[in-house]
Image: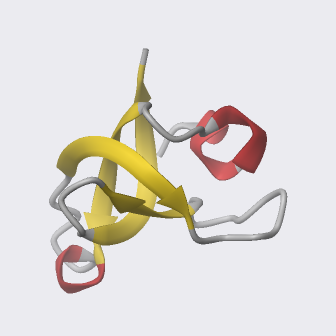
Amino acid sequence: MREDAQYRKNITPGLEVGIVLKKDQRSGKVTYGIVQDLLTSAAYHSRGIKVRLEDGQVGRVVEILY
């Protein structure tokens, strides 16, 4: 995981990100999409900020695609 994915300030709606879904935590499979909502209210989370993608999937950000 990239360190910048652990800070809420680096993630905004409309940003393209890679997330790990709950069901994929063991395998680490990454799903890509556009952020709709930020679900983590804390400024920092060690496993990544939880977001909802525009297609409704929820997971923790592991990479930000700039």
Relative side of 50 to 21, left or right: right
Q: Residue at x 72, y 49 (%)?
A: 8
| Front one among 24 and 51 | 51
| Front one among 6 and 27 | 6
**Residue 44 image offset from top left, x and y in percent:** 79, 58
**Residue 6 image offset from top left, x and y in percent:** 66, 51
Locate residue 19: give its quadrant: bottom left
Q: How many marks?
A: 0
Locate residue 5: give its quadrant: top right
**Residue 48 image offset from top left, x and y in percent:** 57, 59
Q: Residue at x 15, y 71 (%)?
A: 27
| Front one among 4 and 40 | 40
Q: Residue at x 71, y 65 (%)?
A: 45
Q: Residue at x 37, y 69 (%)?
A: 59
Relative to 22, say whether 33 is above or below.
above
Relative to 20, say whether 14 is above or below.
above
Relative side of 60 to 55, left or right: right
Residue at the extreme top: 66
Residue at the extreme right: 43
**Residue 24 image offset from top left, x and y in percent:** 18, 75
